[in-house]
């Protein structure tokens, strides 16, 4: 039993939680991940100003042409594409892969924005491995 | 830079992204796409204790050499492999038969290095595959595989199954706090039935065999059904555990919370290395039990209780009960004794110091000490002091304790009606405590105190039990060595206790109880004794109490006597002391005000402090009158003389008896009248026509209730005096029980009555002959001043009271006055033989009265009658008696 909050009423909850844990321990429950698609999701930052949203996607090693940015309505933007396995350049012959952590293959990321954006004026730039997408908001006249 | 493409159409998953075509990527392509993407041959990775379902992302740890080689090759190539579960996990190098036939083709997403240096492959299951043909086993396995694509035929059943499964799965997720929230998201986002089934199957806590079965269930409906069934089970279990948890939560109240906190406290203390409160208590008790010196059986019981105390949680009320019990056990003086001071002289001195008189009691105590001196193992006697209030029964007990050097306990039993007062309540009752006996023994601190049971005659009994019966065990010397109090439930040895009971009257005490005790009478003090007590103890004490000790205040002897005689009427000395105290207080007031000293109190002064005299002693009549005689009565406050008055008047033959006379006395009155009537001729009494005469006997004082048979002779004498017209000698007091035969039976309270006679100024006392030995108890001074006459028959009495007449016991008999001389004859022999002679004696007087004057025959018969009448109780001395009588003629 833990003594983290000895003397407080939370003891009871802790104890109950412990009981829960014990029960679950008995059932040996752990969660198995499921992925219905083959795509991985790149890391994304979303910024907002008064007039626009700004999205930054961590997407190193891409050819800009391989990236697709699309909006299917005024609140949603989709970034998709395919990133090939990084391979050391100028090395031929057999390669042994010991550690493989970098995501590769098809990727897709969708971001939902609270305020409507002007789809026509969406711009995307690729710089130093970051994909920047500017999404101006619809200004109310 | 890529162009942002506007795409209003709904997302089509199968849109190939612009740019490079992905090499051999299965992606989310289904159906033929998969068949197209998957190579016919795949490296086979055996996995242990794990079944990988399509769609799941699972980490695999790579340990075996073959697996490592396989991994390297796979990573170098298209990152595709097939996973098959081993039937038995122990097999290091499985053959084809060691693997299940159905597995899962998967793609390697990541290769991670674990902290311990081993590799972990993150794989994404793609599709079910079956092994068609093994192609190679070295350096790793390769086989031809056959993918199985799930066929999904939409149907209502399938829809329902999906919906149902999802719902149950949601509940399972909700009931399992360990499952992360994304599970819910994933669950909600899967819409393909086969994927749903696989996701759920992967997350159920099942064994390998069951999971493999699910993997091999190609039919989606079937698969879903199976999964749902298992989910149902799980949800039931979860619901139940949830309910239990809720119940537990609800039932946790303060007590349990405290227990929980106590347990935590104990654990902390244990960690700190300190012994906690309970353990300390247990140790302490253990030490106390050792030190208490209990007998073996008791010690075992105590140990047993101690073990129970260890087991019982400290918060429960039972622990308190056990602790109280153990405390009691430890505090009883199992073997603590005070040594008896057996110095007999010292004991005697102390007893005399505290009390005056009471010689027989003091003698008994000294005897007890002497016996103990000679035989230390003797059992304590059980004494009972019986006497009126105020004679000093309780203070005598204190004195005895002091003389012996023992502790003194006093238990007042007056009004005690509940047996549990003696024996205690069983421990199972709330608030149970041991009985008074054990309680007081504990207070005394020794197992051989002097234990005084006050007011034994005032023990009650009701539905709660009979305390007198409870005392039987306590007071039985054969049983009290193992007195078992209900609370203690172990025996305690009371045999060393010196028990003293007190009572005002011995009759209300239960016979069984009476039987066990040695009754010692403390009958109350004589005037002389009271005087001595007052002079030696009471006056000095009261002077000191009232601050007059050094003021030279004295009481004259006459004053003391006056207080005793005129202001108190009691057997004891309480009122006496109180009266002396009143006088002292009055004196103190005077002294304090006037600063006067040197006061001597005389009888005349008493009026000032005590008011007019409250009691006048009945004194002997100066002059008698016919029909009045002086009787002697016994009261708890001492003896008293009473006057029996008889008078006759014209009437219709009524006979009245008044004076608040009790039933027995009333019967004596009737018997007296009958004797008079039956012997009138014998005595030559002239009776009036009783049919026209009313007779009234009255015994003043009318307000004082009287009872008892001992006024019988007085009533006869009163009537005789009345009808004979003779004045009874006012200086003669009489007492005795009368029978129709004319016998005088013995009475009680001889000493008190004689003392009363003496006090009243009588000269002669007529007693039943059989009471002669009781005269020993009368102080010599008193005995010497009185003349005693002993009577066997009523005629003897009459002769003493009305000496001017002759009272023949049979017609024509001569004087039988000699029977009034002192005759000392042994009682024992005679007492047993009255029966036969009695009948003869009964017959004799009748015959005697029937015959008138017939000297010859009468004499001889008279002689016989005389002999018989006189010797009704003394067969052995018939001849001596006859001789004596003969000499008197």
Image (cartoon, coloured by chain):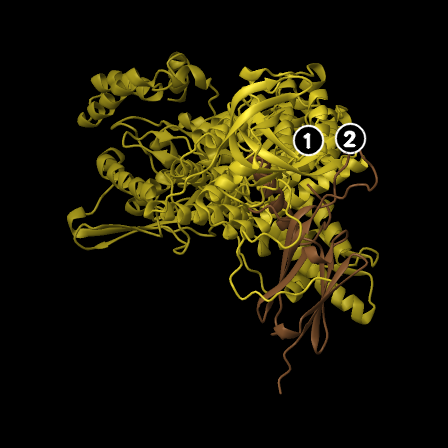
Q: Looking at the image, is B255 positioned above or below residue B447?
A: below
Subunit that carries the residue with mark 1: B
Q: Colour of chain B?
A: yellow
Mark 1 or mark 2, whichever is nearer to me: 2
Q: How many numbered discs?
A: 2
Which chain is drawn using brown?
Answer: A
* Quadrant (top left/top right/bottom left/bottom right) for the N terminus of chain B: bottom right
Q: Position of residue B496 (x, y in %)?
A: 64, 24
> Badge 2 is on which residue?
A94
Helix, strand, or loop for circle 2? loop
Q: Position of residue A30 (x, y in %)?
A: 60, 39
Subunit that carries the residue with mark 2: A
Helix, strand, or loop for circle 1? helix
Within the image, what quadrant is residue B849 found in? top left
Q: Is residue B242 visible?
A: yes
Q: Is there CB contact under 8 Å for labels 1 and 2?
A: no
The lab-note entry on whether marks 1 and 2 share a chain reads no
> Badge 1 is on which residue?
B74
Graded by Cα atoms within 10 Å as few (under 14), some (14 to 19) or many (20 or more), the crowding at tag 1 reads: some
The CA span between labels 1 and 2 is 12 Å
């Amino acid at each position: 039993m833990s003594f983290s909050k000895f003397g407080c009423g939370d003891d009871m909850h802790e104890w109950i939680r412990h009981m829960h844990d014990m029960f679950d321990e008995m059932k040996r429950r752990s969660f198995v991940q499921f992925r219905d698609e083959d795509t991985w999701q790149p890391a994304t930052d979303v910024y907002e100003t008064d007039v626009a949203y700004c999205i930054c996607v961590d997407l190193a090693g891409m050819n800009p042409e391989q990236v697709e940015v699309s909006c299917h309505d005024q609140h949603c933007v989709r970034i998709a594409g395919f990133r090939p396995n990084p391979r050391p350049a100028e090395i031929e012959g057999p390669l042994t892969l010991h550690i493989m952590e970098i995501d590769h293959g098809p990727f897709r990321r969708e971001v939902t924005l609270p305020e409507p954006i002007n789809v026509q004026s969406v711009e995307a730039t690729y710089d130093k491995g970051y994909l920047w997408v500017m999404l101006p908001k619809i200004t109310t006249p | 830079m890529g162009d942002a493409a506007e795409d209003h159409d709904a997302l089509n998953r199968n849109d190939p992204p612009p740019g490079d075509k992905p090499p051999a990527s299965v992606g989310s392509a289904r159906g033929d796409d998969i068949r197209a993407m998957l190579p016919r041959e795949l490296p086979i990775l055996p996995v242990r204790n794990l079944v990988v379902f399509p769609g799941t992302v699972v980490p695999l740890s790579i340990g075996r050499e073959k697996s490592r080689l396989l991994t390297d090759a796979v990573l170098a190539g298209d990152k595709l492999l097939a996973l098959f579960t081993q039937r038995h996990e122990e097999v290091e190098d499985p053959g084809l038969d060691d693997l299940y036939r159905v597995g899962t083709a998967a793609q390697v997403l990541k290769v991670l290095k674990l902290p311990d240096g081993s590799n972990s492959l993150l794989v994404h299951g793609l599709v079910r595959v079956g092994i068609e043909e093994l192609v190679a086993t070295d350096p790793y396995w390769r086989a031809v595989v056959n993918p199985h694509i799930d066929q999904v035929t939409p149907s209502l059943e399938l829809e329902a199954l999906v919906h149902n499964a999802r719902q149950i799965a949601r509940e399972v997720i909700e009931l399992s706090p360990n499952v992360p929230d994304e599970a819910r998201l994933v669950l909600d986002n899967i819409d393909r039935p086969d994927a749903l089934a696989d996701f759920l199957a992967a997350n159920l806590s099942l064994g390998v065999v069951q999971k493999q079965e699910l993997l091999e269930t190609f039919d989606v409906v079937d698969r879903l059904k199976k999964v749902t069934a298992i989910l149902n089970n799980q949800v039931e279990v979860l619901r139940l555990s949830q309910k239990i948890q809720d119940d537990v939560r609800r039932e946790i109240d303060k007590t349990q919370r405290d227990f929980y906190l106590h347990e935590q406290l104990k654990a902390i203390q244990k960690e700190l290395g300190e012994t906690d409160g309970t353990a300390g208590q247990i140790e302490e008790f253990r030490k106390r039990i050792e030190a208490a010196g209990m007998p073996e059986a008791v010690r075992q019981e105590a140990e047993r209780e101690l073990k129970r105390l260890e087991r019982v949680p400290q918060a429960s009320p039972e622990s308190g009960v056990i602790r109280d019990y153990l405390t009691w056990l430890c505090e009883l003086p199992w073997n603590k004794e005070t040594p008896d001071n057996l110095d007999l002289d010292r004991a005697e001195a102390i007893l005399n110091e505290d009390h005056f008189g009471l010689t027989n009691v003091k003698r008994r105590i000294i005897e007890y000490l002497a016996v103990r001196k000679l035989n230390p193992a003797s059992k304590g006697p059980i004494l009972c002091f019986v006497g009126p209030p105020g004679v000093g029964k309780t203070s005598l007990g204190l004195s005895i304790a002091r003389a012996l050097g023992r502790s003194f306990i006093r238990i007042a039993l007056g009004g005690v009606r509940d047996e549990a007062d003696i024996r205690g309540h069983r421990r199972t009752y709330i608030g149970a405590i041991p009985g008074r006996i054990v309680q007081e023994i504990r207070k005394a601190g020794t197992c051989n105190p002097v234990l005084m049971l006050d007011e034994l005659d005032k023990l009650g009994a009701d539905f709660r039990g009979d305390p007198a019966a409870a005392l039987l065990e306590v007071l039985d010397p054969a049983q009290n060595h193992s007195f078992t109090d209900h609370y203690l439930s172990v025996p305690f040895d009371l045999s060393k206790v010196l028990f003293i009971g007190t009572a005002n009257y011995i009759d209300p005490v239960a016979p069984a109880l009476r039987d066990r005790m040695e009754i010692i009478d403390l009958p109350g003090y004589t005037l002389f004794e009271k005087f001595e007590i007052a002079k030696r103890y009471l006056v000095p004490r009261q002077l000191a109490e009232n601050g007059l000790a050094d003021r030279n205040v004295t009481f004259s002897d006459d004053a003391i006597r006056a207080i005793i005689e005129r202001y108190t009427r009691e057997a004891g000395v309480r009122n006496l002391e109180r009266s002396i105290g009143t006088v002292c207080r009055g004196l103190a007031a005077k002294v304090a005000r006037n600063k006067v000293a040197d006061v001597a109190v005389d009888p005349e002064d008493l009026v000032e402090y005590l008011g007019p005299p409250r009691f006048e002693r009945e004194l002997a009549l100066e002059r008698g009158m016919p029909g009045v005689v002086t009787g002697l009565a016994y009261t708890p406050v001492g003896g008293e003389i009473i006057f029996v008055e008889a008078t006759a008047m014209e009437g219709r033959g009524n006979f009245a008896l008044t004076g608040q006379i009790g039933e027995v006395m009333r019967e004596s009155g009737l018997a007296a009248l009958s004797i008079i009537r039956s012997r009138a001729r014998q005595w030559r009494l002239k009776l009036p026509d009783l049919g026209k005469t009313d007779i009234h006997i009255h015994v003043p004082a009318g307000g004082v209730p009287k009872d008892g048979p001992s006024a019988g002779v007085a009533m006869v004498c009163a009537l005789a005096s009345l009808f004979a017209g003779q004045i009874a000698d006012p200086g003669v007091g009489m007492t005795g029980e009368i029978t129709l035969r004319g016998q005088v039976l013995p009475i009680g309270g001889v000493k008190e009555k004689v003392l009363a006679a003496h006090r009243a100024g009588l000269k002669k006392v007529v007693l039943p002959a059989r009471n002669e030995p009781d005269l020993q108890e009368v102080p010599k001074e008193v005995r010497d001043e009185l003349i005693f006459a002993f009577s066997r028959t009523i005629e003897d009495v009459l002769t003493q009271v009305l000496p001017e007449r002759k009272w023949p016991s049979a017609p024509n008999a001569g004087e039988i006055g000699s029977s009034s001389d002192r005759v000392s004859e042994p009682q024992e022999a005679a007492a047993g033989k009255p029966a036969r002679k009695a009948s003869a004696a009964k017959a004799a007087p009748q015959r005697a009265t029937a015959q008138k004057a017939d000297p010859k025959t009468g004499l001889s018969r008279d002689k016989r009658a005389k002999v018989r009448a006189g010797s009704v109780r003394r067969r052995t001395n018939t001849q001596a008696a006859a001789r004596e009588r003969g000499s008197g003629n």
